[in-house]
Amino acid sequence: MQEKLFGNSRDSNIYDRFMMEDFVGESLASSTVDLYGRKIIQIAQRASVNYFGLTPEIVANDIINRIGSKKITGATARLEKSAALFWLAEQAKSAFDSGDKDMWRFEEAYTDIKLISTGDMPKKSKNTSSPKAKAFSDHAVDVLMNAASTHRSELLINALIFIRANLYVGLRPVEWFSARLINYEHKN
């Protein structure tokens, strides 16, 4: 029924966005909310303010300039636009609940960002991690092996064991936090 009253979230204004849910973002995965938060912190860093110093105008200008420069890909532009819209709706809800008379600032920034098209953004960017090394070179492993055998440092040996295990199983660094050793030796 809310879909019929307010339209989908792509068509709604800022009031519809925060009135459709008990709290802004309740339908989003927590990982998405975290990602949006990291994007907003990046906006604050680019503006040289702390998170609490952000204003709707700073957020809107950052997104407008980043998308207008066409130096980011369409996927990045859509992500940053969504993060900004989420932050604006969240802040507007808080302002609304407290009776803030400056609600129009959030609404204006929200509308400005919603009107930005990301359809003509580049599909690929030169600002990628593709030139970065994705693994230890054989030479680097050999240097570490020689250093470990010469210096007998327990830390160096443990680091080398970790690096060799990582090369063997191919996990990303963040995946190691949830990695487990399982013994299948006695199982069918």
Image (cartoon, rainbow, N blue to C red):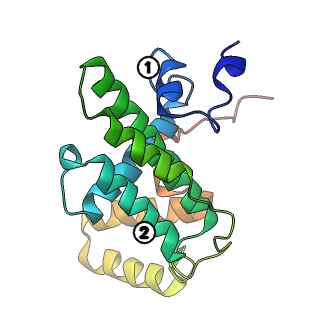
Q: Amino acid at mark 1?
A: Phe
Q: Describe residue 64's horizontal placement relative to residue 119 as left or right.
A: left
- Residue 172 location (% of width, % of height): 53, 57
- Residue 67 location (% of width, % of height): 51, 67
- Residue 100 location (% of width, % of height): 23, 26
Res. 31 in view: yes
Q: Which residue is mark 2?
A: 65
Q: Which mark is residue 23?
A: 1
Labelled pair 2, 1 in contact (Cβ < 8 Å): no
Q: Residue at x 27, y 56 (%)?
A: 44
Q: Nearer the viewer, residue 38 or 56?
A: 56
- Residue 37 location (% of width, % of height): 38, 43
Disc 1, SS = loop
Looking at marks 2 and 1 on the same chain, the residue that comes earlier in the sequence is marked by 1
Disc 2, SS = helix
Q: Quadrant of residue 181?
A: top right
Q: Residue at x 41, y 78 (%)?
A: 145
Image quadrant in which the C terminus is located: top right
